[in-house]
Amino acid sequence: MITATVETRENYLTHEYGVKSWLLTQDHKRIALLYLGAISFFFFLGGIFATVIRLELLTPPGDLVSAQTYNKLFSLHGIIMVFLFLVPSIPATLGNFLVPMMIGAKDLAFPKLNLLSWYILMVGGLLVLYAMLVGGVDTGWTFYVPFSTSYANTYVIMTGMGIFIAGFSSILTGLNFIVTIHRMRAPGLTWFRLPLFIWSMYATSIIQVLGTPVIAVTMLLVVLERGFHLGIFDPALGGDPVLFQHLFWFYSHPAVYIMVLPGMGVISEIVSVYSRKKVFGYRAVAFSSVAIAILSFLVWGHHMFVSSQSVYASMVFSFLSFLVAVPSAIKVFNWTATLYKGSISYDTPMLYAFGFIGLFTIGGLTGTFLATLGFDVHVTDTYFIVAHFHYIMVGGTMMAYLGGLHYWWPKMTGRMYPELWARLSALVIFLGFNLTFFPQFIMGYLGMPRRYHAYPEEFQVYHVLSTAGASVLAVGYLIPLVYLIWSLRYGKLAPDNPWNASGLEWQTTSPPPPENFDITPVVNHEAYDYSTLEEMKVG
Amino acid sequence: MANHTTLALRHQFDNVEQQKDASTFGMWVFLVTEILFFGGMFCCYTVYRSLYPSAFGHASNHLDVMLGAVSTAVLICSSFTMACAVNSAATGAKNALAAFLWVTILFAAAFLVVEMSEWHMLYKEGLMPGFNFTYHDVDPAHVQLFFCMYFAMTGLHASHVTIGIGLLVVMAIRASRGAFTPQYYTPIEISGLYWHFVDLVWIFLFPLYYLIARHLH
Amino acid sequence: MNPSLKLVLEQASATAVHLDYLTLYLLVVAAIFSTLIFALIFFFAVKYRRRSNHERPVEVHGALTLEIIWTVVPFILMMVMFVWGVNVFFEMSRPPDDAMNVYVVGKQWMWKTQHLEGQREINELHVPLGRPIKLTMTSEDVIHSFFMPAFRVKFDVLPGRYTTAWFNPTKTGKYHLFCAEYCGTLHSGMIGWIYVMEPAEYETWLAGGSGSESLASRGEKLFQYLACANCHRTDQPGRCPNLQGMFGTGVQLTTGETVKADESYIRESILNPSAKIVAGYQNIMPSFQGQVTEEDLLQLMEYIKSLGKPAAAGGTAAGNATAPPVRVGRGAAPARPAPGQKNR
C-alpha cells in the first residue's frame, strides 16, 4: 500500500495529467515512456509468433498450422522484432530518457522532432499491424527478390511501406541524439568525461543516420517494382536480384549494431556501478564503439557468400568481418577487467550484465565462425545462423535492455522493483535462453535448414529441447511484466541514488523534475568517479 | 509568449547561439541522411550502367536534352534566388526576402511543370515502365531498367522539390509577416541548405541521365 | 540408433573432412575463450563480492600493454581462421577440370536434375562414387539454394543466370538434399536425396532409363526446329556467327569488349540477343524469350558445347576445360558418347 509520503516536489510524472499531456508532450522523459509502452507491446506480439513457431516445430511434420501460415509467422516475428522492437528499444526508451540527463541538458535538441519520431513509429507500426491482420506477409524479414516483388501473394507493399515509415523514426532519433551530444553537453563535460552509454548512443546514432536511408530507398524500390510491375530487380524483366541483396544488407548489417551497441553501453554503466569501479580501459571502450560503427558498414557481403558474389569480394568481406570482431572483443575483456578488485554486488542489473557478457561472448565467437568463409558456406541458411543472431539479440541486447530497465527503473518511476522476483526472473531467462538456442547451433551444423515448416525426423530431439527452453524463457519474460507494472503502484519509493552511482542522472530526484536539473550542473571530474560519493546507507 | 518579432529561445537551450548552432547542425545531419537516401538509387544506377552501357546509351537518347537543360537552368536560378533570400534575411531587407522566396517558389513550380511534361511525353512514347512500355529496339530489358531508374530517381527528386515548395511557402508567409530579423533568420538559412541540396541532386541527375552517349545521335 | 536424434554429420566428401578440421579449430578457440570469460567472471564475482556497504575499491588503472595483448592475440587467432577459411572456400569454389557435368533446374517447389546422357530426375540425383560432379544450376522462378550437408555443399540457384557448385563423393549412400533459400510456401518441401553409387551400379542405372536421349542430341533437334540452323550455318559464312568451337572462347562484341562465351552468354544470346552483338554482325537475331524453357536452354547449350572445331577425331578441342569433345564430320547427328568416353 502506498505510504503517505510528503512529495512536495513535483516531478515529470505529476507535473501534468491527462491524455493530451502525454500525447502532446515534448518532454523526452515522457516520450521515453510512450516508446516503452509501444515497444513492449511489439515485443510480446513478436513473442506470441515465436511461441506458435516453436510449438509447430515440436513435431517433424507441419501439422499445427499450414505452410503459408508458418511462413507468415516467422516473417512477422522477424519484422516486428527487428524493426518495431529491437531497433527502437534501448535508444528510444533508455536513450531518450537518459541522454539529456547524462549530459546535464534539459531536453534533447529537438523535442518536437522527438515526439514526431514516436508518432512516425506508431504509424509505421500500425501499418505493419494492419497488414498482419488482413493477411500478413510471407517473404521473411529479408524480402528477397524476385519472390517478394513478383511471386508472393501477401501484403508485401503494405508491410514494406510500414517498414519504410518506421525507418524515419530511427533516422530522426539518431539525428536528435547526434546534435544533442555534440551541442548540449554541460560545462566541463568533455568528450572523454562522457559516460560510455553516451558514446554507445552516439555511435548507434551515426549508424542509424547513415544506414537507415538505404533500407528506406530499397523498400521503396521493392514497393514500386511490385506495384507497377517494374524490372529493377526481377531478372525476367532485366533486373538483378543480387543487387537487392547488396542494398538490403548494406543497412541490415549495420542494423544489427544499432541493436547491440546500445546494449553494450548499458552494460558499461551497470558493470561500473555494481563493481564500484570505473570501467577498465575507458578510452578503449569509447573508441571501440566508434570503430564498430565505422567497420559495420564494410562487412555486409558476409551475408552473401553463396549468393554468386565474386570469390574475391567474399574474401574482402571475410577479412573485414574479422576486423569488426576485434573492438567487440576489446569491450568484453575490458568489462571483465572492470570486475577485478571491484566491490561486486549481485543486484538484478548486474546479473543481467553477467548474462550479457557470457552470452554475447558466445554469440560473438560464433560470429567469427561465420566470418570464416568455408565454414559459412556450410551453415548459412541453417539453424546455426538462427542460434548466432539470437545469442546476440536475445542473449545480448534483450538482457542488456532488461538490465538497463531495472537499473534505471527507480530513476524513471520513483519506485523500486521487488529484488527477489527480479533476480529469479533473470536466472529463469538465462536458463531458458540457453536451452532454447544452444541446441540450434548443433542442429544447424548437422544440416537443419532455417525457415522450414516441416523437417526430417532426425532433428526432432533438438527442436523439442529448443521448444522446452522457449517455454521457460516465456515465463521468464512474463514475470517482469507483472512485477514492473505492480511496482508502479506498490513498489517501495526510490531514493535519488539507490545504487550509489556516479553520473549526472543520479544527481537529481527520482523521478526527475520536468526540467531535469534545478541548475545546470558543471562537470569537473572523470566519468565513473566514485571517490566523491558520500557513504550511503544500505539500500 | 514571444511574439513574432522577438526571438523564441526554446527552453532546452541555454542561449540563442546554441539554438542556432544546433538547428543548423541538425539540418546538415539531415542532409547527410538524404545523401544516403539518394545514394542508394545512385548506386543502383551505377551498377546497371556499368553492366549495360549500350542499353543506357540508347535509352538516354530518348530523353529530351533541351527540356532537361531548361529544368537544370530553372533550378540553378532558384538556388540563386534562394541564396539572395538568405542574404536579404541576414541584412534585414524584409521585402526583398519575401520577394526572393516567392520567386524561388515560382522557379521550383516551373521546374515541376517541365518535369511533368517530360514524363507525359515519355508516357506517350511508350517509355514509362509499368504503363504500356513498348520499346522494341536494342536490348529492351535493360532499356526498361534505365527508365525504371529514371522515373524512380526523378520522381523521388520531384517529391523533394514539392516538399521544398511547401517549406518555402511557409517561410515566405512568415517572412511577409515580418517574422525574421538579422538576429533571427535560422529557418530561412536551413531552408536554404535544404533547397541547395535538392538542386545539387538534380545537377548530378541531369548529366547521368540526359547526357550519356550523346555522340550516338 | 534413434531416428530422431542425429549426432554426427556424415563426411561424404574430402571437402567435408577438410571443413570439419577447420570447424574443430573454431570450436577449440571458442571453447577456450568462452571458458576463460565465464571463469573469470565467475571467479571475480565471487572473490570480489561486496562484503560491506562501505567498501571503496582501489582504482585499477588501465594498462596499455594489456589492451594491446588482448587485441593482438585474438586478431592473430582470427587471421588463422581467415586464411584457413579462404583455403577451404577456394577448394569449394573450384571444380576440377575433369568434373562430370550435371544440370540442375530449381523451381517452386522441386529440383529437376539433368544428366548429359539424358536422364532426368526430380528431387533426386544419382551420381557415381569417386568422380567430381559439377552442378550447373539455374532457377525458373525465385532464388533457391542447393544444399547437400553431407558434402558441405551449398550455393544459391538464381533465375536468369547460371551458378555452379561441385563435389566429389567419397562414400556411397543416400544423403539429404535441401533447398536452403526461402522460396515460398513449400520451401520446406523442396527436399530430396542424393544417391552415391558404385561406378558399375551407376552405369547400370544410367543405361536403365527408357532410351533417354542425350541432352546434346535433343539440343540439336531443337536447334533445327527453332530454325537456328538457318542463320547459324556451319557450311558457309552467313549472317550469323559460326558456333563451331565457340563455346568457352572469347568473343569480341561491337562495343569493343571481349566476353567469354560461357553458359550465361549463350543463355543471354538466345533470350536477349540485342544485349551483346558480335563484332562484324548486325542486330538481327530475334529473341526466343517465352519460346524456350530452362530445360530447352540446357539442351541447346549442350548441343552448342558439342560443336567442336573440326580437328583430329577423338581428341579434345583446344581451349579451356569446358571445351566439348570433337564431332567427327559435319552435319551428322552427334554419336551418343560411348561408355567410358567422358563428356566435358
Image (cartoon, rainbow, N blue to C red):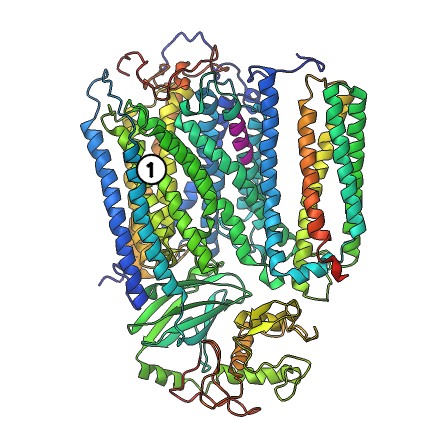
Tell me what residue is drawn at x 53 percent, y 77 percent.
C247
The answer for which chain carries disc 1 is A
Let me know if residue A36 appears in the view: no
Q: Where residue A141 sits in the image (x, y, percent)? A: 49, 48
> Would you say residue A502 sits in the magenta stretch?
no
Tell me what residue is drawn at x 45 percent, y 43 percent.
A296
Quadrant position of the C terminus of chain A in the picture: top left
Our reading of the magenta stretch's main secondary structure is helix
Which segment is the magenta one?
Answer: A171-180
User: Where is residue B143, by image quadrant?
Assistant: bottom right
Tell me what residue is drawn at x 66 percent, y 52 percent.
B149
Viewer-side residue, C65 vs A495:
C65
Up/down of B17 relative to A51, above or below: above
Up/down of A329 relative to C294, above or below: above
Up/down of C40 relative to A347, above or below: below
User: Where is residue B33, by image quadrant?
Assistant: top right
On the rendered structure, is A107 left or right of C24?
right
On the rendered structure, is C238 left or right of A539?
right
On the rendered structure, is C293 left or right of B70?
left
Up/down of B78 relative to C13, above or below: above
Q: Where residue C25 sits in the image (x, y, percent)? A: 26, 54
Q: Where residue C57 sits in the image (x, y, percent)? A: 24, 21
Tell me what residue is drawn at x 29 percent, y 74 percent.
C172
Q: Where residue A324 sits in the image (x, y, percent)? A: 40, 43
Let me know if residue B204 appears in the view: yes
On the rendered structure, is A381 left or right of A144?
left
Quadrant position of the N terminus of chain A in the picture: top left
10 Å neighbourhood of mark 1: few (<14), some, or many (≥20)? Answer: some
Q: Amino acid at mark 1?
A: Ile
Disc 1 designates what residue? A330
Viewer-side residue, A2 vs B154:
B154
